[in-house]
Structures are given as structure tokens and as C-alpha cells.
Amino acid sequence: MQALRLHKKIENDGEVHVTGLPCHRGQHVEMILLIEQEEPASRKTLHADELLKSSGLVGMWSDRTDIGDSVAFARKLRASAQTRK
């Protein structure tokens, strides 16, 4: 199954016009409409290097002396969060 993502603005109530699809007569398709409540914010794709430069999340625990093995520490946090009441 192939998925296509299209963004359309409704011009007339209750109507969506879609053309130029890579479909042929007799082919079955399924359509799912996701209705946005507001105008979508401008969507900017971040690459890993941009995220690394702009986010304070990457490396935020680097100065912590109580964390030796970060993988084991994260596993312990997840386990305690799952058993919390």
C-alpha cells in the first residue's frame, strides 16, 4: 500500500477536490481525512545538527556526577515511572 500526504484548503463546505493522483480506473483506494482545528503552524524540518545546536536537551546531563552509565540510569527512571502510583 502506498501512502500520500496532501494538504488542501476547503473552498466549498463539504467538498474536497483532489486531482493528479497516481491511481488508475478500477483501482481501490482508501481515504482518511484529518481535519485541523486551526491553521497549521509553519512546519520546519530540523536536521540532527540543527537540533544539536539549537536544543539544550542534547547533553543536558553531561555534568551530572551521579549518573555513571546513562543507559542504565534511563532504564531505572523508566522502571520507577512505570511502577509509580
Image (cartoon, rainbow, N blue to C red):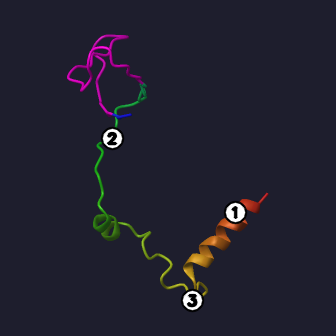
Q: Give the range drawn in magenta.
A: 4-31
Q: Which amino acid does label 2 sit on?
A: Ala
Instruction: Tell me: residue 38, above or below residue 77.
Output: above
Q: Does the magenta stretch include residue 60?
A: no
Q: What residue type is labelled 3?
A: Thr
Asked if marks 3 and 1 touch (Cβ < 8 Å), the reply is no
Q: Residue 68: percent from the left, percent from the top?
A: 58, 87
Q: How far apart are marks 3 and 1 (CA)?
A: 22 Å
| Residue labelled with disc 2 | 41
Direction from residue 67 to residue 12 in the image, left or right = left
| Residue labelled with disc 1 | 81
x 65%, y 70%: residue: 77
Where the N terminus falls, by quadrant?
top left
Please tell me whether mark 2 sits on a helix, a strand or a loop: loop
Q: What residue type is labelled 1?
A: Ala
Q: Residue 11: percent from the left, percent from the top?
A: 27, 15
For marks 3 and 1, the one nearer the N-term is 3
x 29%, y 61%: residue: 47
Q: Does the magenta stretch include residue 10?
A: yes
The circle drawn on residue 9 is none
| Residue labelled with disc 3 | 65
SS majority, magenta: loop
Direction from residue 78 to residue 34 in the image, left or right = left
Q: Quadrant of residue 37?
A: top left
Where the C terminus falls, by quadrant?
bottom right
Instruction: Tell me: residue 7, above or below residue 18.
Output: below
Q: Residue 65: percent from the left, percent from the top?
A: 57, 89
Q: Indicate which label's residue lies in the foreground, 2 or 1.
A: 1
